[in-house]
Amino acid sequence: MPELLQLLVNGLMAGTVLAVPAIGFTAIYAVLRFPNFALASHATIGAFGGYVANTAGGLPAWAAVAVAFAVAGLVGVLSDTLVLRPLRPAGAITTAIAAVALNIALENVVRFVFGNDHRGYDLPLQRDWQVAAIRVGPQQFQNLLIALVAMAALFLFLAFTRTGKAMRAVADNPTLANVKGVDADRVGRLVNFVGMGLAGVGGMLLGLDTSIDPLTGFRVILSVFAAAVVGGLGSIPGAVVGALTIGVAEELSLVALAPAYRTAVGFVAILFVLTLRPRGILGERAY
């Protein structure tokens, strides 16, 4: 029982962090109507942007997260404008394939600049906190708080700002939004900035708990995609529910499986949901 409780706590914390890039993935899908798998490389770019701000710039980890968001968001807008946007009229499948190619190219740019070595952030050494038989790392808890703040800020932005409402309008009905005078191109750039920025934050949070290298985002993209599918592609609340489900499932799988097989949980979750509830737990584009 203590082991199961520890795994459950770890899963909830990991799922909360996973929810940040999963929200970015599903937001881009909701507005632009294609799965942008280049999110993996942008998570890596954000992680390295935060790494430079932390180690070379001297910023504390919580402040360097803002740099990770900005760097990944700006690269996301630039890469979409130059590579993906011209291909979107050709359809979702063509654009998704181009996103995979873009992901590989950006990963190799990171590899060329930083090399293949694993790198760690400049963090103070701290002992784990222990409550009864449950252990929680201080950095793990800080990552949880940062993820919660990022998600709360996004929900408030979507609910109470004019720009956020415009994003929701384009996601719900792009034709009607265009009739009402909403600039779909501007919304597309904004959702790329926010979505890839959240990917960068997620990449850095993952790196704070372990280390980073050019494949940081690639290792987590299946879990991100699974979270979005389980929750319902296009549903931001669904991405949170899906991420928590995947996070807990991956941790509990360690009871019966070796750690190397935990990524298989994402495959199983996708197959299970597509078979029983193709639209996911919360359906499509439910805000």
Image (tube, rainbow, N blue to C red):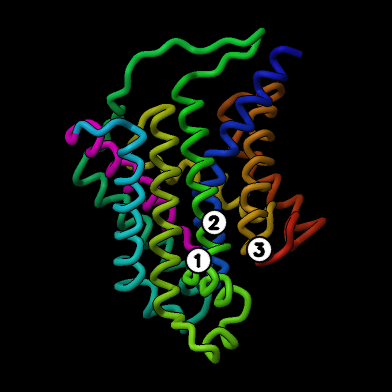
Instruction: Describe residue 220's horizontal placement relative to residue 63 as left or right.
Output: right
Mark on residue 161?
Answer: 1
Residue type, label 2? Leu
Q: Which x, y percent locates residue 116?
A: 27, 36
Spatial CA span between label 2 and label 3: 12 Å
Q: Which residue position holds label 2?
A: 156
- Which of discs 1 and 3 lies nearer the camera? The answer is 1
Spatial CA span between label 1 and label 3: 14 Å
Q: Residue 50 in magenta?
A: yes
Whether the residues at callouts 1 and 2 have beta carbons within 8 Å, the answer is: yes
Residue drawn where x is 30% and y is 40% of the image: 50
* Residue 113 image-quadrant placement: top left
Whether the residues at callouts 1 and 3 have beta carbons within 8 Å, the answer is: no
Q: Is residue 112 above or below residue 75?
A: above
- Quarter of the rendering occupied by the N terminus: top right
Mark on residue 53?
Answer: none
